[in-house]
Image (spheres, grey):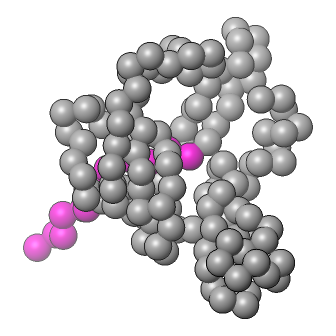
Amino acid sequence: MDIPRYWRLKNQRYKLQGRRCIDCETLSFPPRIVCQKCKSRNTEPFQFRGQGTLYSFTIIFQASGKFENSAPYIVGLIDLEEGVRITAQLTDITADEVRIGMDLEMVTRQIYEDGPRGPILYGYKFRPHLIKPVAV
Ligand SMILES: [Zn+2]
């Protein structure tokens, strides 16, 4: 991806920003200018919290191009708490530890390095949501 395109997509990739239909309240991610449900163009930016549960996952053993160095990796289908299902790479977890239905949270991580002298691009990934023990 070229750098200008990266910056245009920054809010979407970095902050998990989608859109909300003002007419029927349907949420979209990736953001869609036209509402999928009622076809309204009356939509506004919507910030997802980045909390969800794992619906399904797949393990990628053979990656190509810029993702070559990161294989194997896990790609999850994640149900966000706002009710939208998205695809994202999982991080800080091994294949043995992944469980359907586990709680996940969004983090910003390196996606790939664009050549030895190129910029390192960042984007969202999801990791297990660690519930901190309550002090007694
Ligand atoms: Zn709508």
- Rendered image quadrant of residue 80: bottom left
Is 62 rendered above or below residue 98?
A: above
Residue drawn at x 20%, y 39% as measured from the top left = 97
> Going by the image, does 24 lie left or right of 88?
right
Residue drawn at x 51%, y 14% as measured from the top left = 69
Is 89 rendered above or below residue 30?
A: above
Task: Say whether residue 128 is magenta.
Answer: yes
Closer to us: 46 or 37: 37
Q: Quadrant of the C terminus?
A: bottom left
Is 72 rendered above or below residue 4?
A: above
Stretch in magenta: 124-136
The rendered magenta stretch, by its main secondary structure, is classed as: loop
Closer to us: 57 or 113: 57
Closer to us: 130 or 103: 103
At which x and y percent is residue 102? Answer: 26, 56
Residue drawn at x 69%, y 54% as measured from the top left = 12
One can see residue 28 in this view: yes
Q: Residue furthest left?
A: 136
Task: Say whether residue 117 is magenta.
Answer: no
